[in-house]
Amino acid sequence: MAQRDYYEVLGVQRSAGQDEIKSAFRNLARQYHPDVNKSPDAEERFKEINEAYAVLSDPEKRAAYDRYGHAGLNGMGGMPDFSTMDFSDIFEELFGFGMGMGNRRSRNAPRRGADLNYPISLSFEEAVFGVEKEIEITRDEVCSRCRGTGAEPGTSPRRCPTCGGRGEVRQVRQTILGSMVQVTTCPTCNGAGESIETPCKTCHGRGLERKTIRKTVSIPAGIDNGQQIRLAGEGQPGVNGGPNGNLYLEVQVKPHKFFHRKQDDIWLNLNINIAQAVLGAEVEVPTIDGTARLNIPPGTQPGKVFTIRGKGVPHLRSNGRGDQHVVVNVEVPTRLTAEQRKLFEQLAQTLGSEVKPEEKSFFERLKEFF
């Protein structure tokens, strides 16, 4: 029977990259593996899929196949020899077993501890200028009674009789691809490789005890809402001598009564009365550093933005600071005294009653500024 095109077997284009070929093989291998698919032609289909992948995953064999087809493989030792090929990584990922080709990483190898996340709340000023903050976190620590062994002092763990200390048990099976080894966690020791006959009274055999830790951390100036601060090695303890995980502080900045932050600039809405807008004035403006004097020129329109240089947020990773922007809002009085009303009536007579549409709204001008 004529052999099918290998690209057709895997269902990929001839221009497919290695990642696409590997992905197609994984999907088909999972579908047609004889241990999963009990149809009569599953075994032959599975052989065909593996043969196609063996060629197309090898750059040299694929180049020969692309140029000469199946005949191009004859000068390269004929069809692939599955007994010398290593599919262990793929089959272990798909089905949880390897093919006995090389050693798997021991379950007792050192492993890094888990990371911890901790929310930390800051005021607007603390985020701007930085602060020393005391935090309280709960994490595992090596048990002070058993020193991490999990066994009551005076006793010691013993090697698991089921797995011999490996933490896993293996079962060899014969398949069309050769001997395959199915690896599962040891049911006796749950992967620890040791059994504890007399558990520690403090940690109950875990080797770890839950503790509340207080630490003082330095919050850098300029930190913003939603950013993280990493404290290396302050997370969960490592396993089998592995390094500790990290602690990540998730910054939450409380809103300010007046100020609004946009990156490293601070924005402030300032209300002035109609006389100050018309005649001009010098006013005091709140800043994050205290008050500052701001000159309002005559004829200032609502929505006018004034910038005070260097009164913004310190740059987090460089020198200097942002600016403060003051958006002027002209307050129209809703209550007037008799004298004020008379003065406005006199002013109105001099200004006339003509009105005209504004070409751009206040919000459009503000949008253009941003």
Image (cartoon, rainbow, N blue to C red):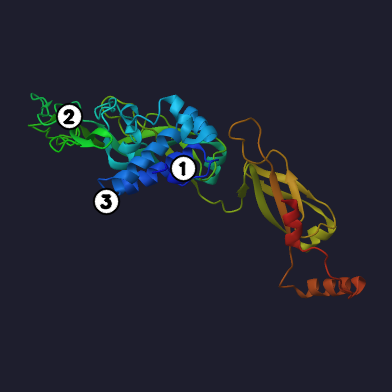
The residue under label 1 is 5
The answer to whether mark 3 and mark 1 are in CB contact below 8 A is: no
Q: Amino acid at mark 1?
A: Asp
Q: CA distance from mark 2 to mark 1?
A: 48 Å
* Location of residue 234 by image quarter: top left
Residue 369, x across and y down, in percent: 75, 51
Q: From the viewer's perspective, is 140 left or right of 352?
A: left
Q: Is residue 312 visible?
A: yes
Q: How many marks?
A: 3
Q: Could you tell me how far apart the alpha carbons at marks 3 and 1 are, in whole angstroms?
A: 22 Å
Residue at x 30%, y 49% (from the top left corner)? 41
Q: Earlier in the sequence, mark 3 or mark 1?
A: 1
Rate crowding at label 3 as few (under 14), some (14 to 19) or many (20 or more) other CA atoms within 10 Å.
Answer: few
Q: Secondary structure at mark 1?
A: loop
**Toward the viewer: 100 or 365?**
100
Q: Say which residue label 2 marks.
A: 193
The reply to whether the C-beta atoms of the residues labelled 2 and 3 are less than 8 Å apart is no
* Residue 178 locus on image (x, y percent): 25, 33
Looking at marks 2 and 3 on the same chain, the residue that comes earlier in the sequence is marked by: 3
- What residue did someone put label 3 on? 40
Residue 297 position within the rendered picture, expressed as x and y whole percent measured from the top left: 83, 52
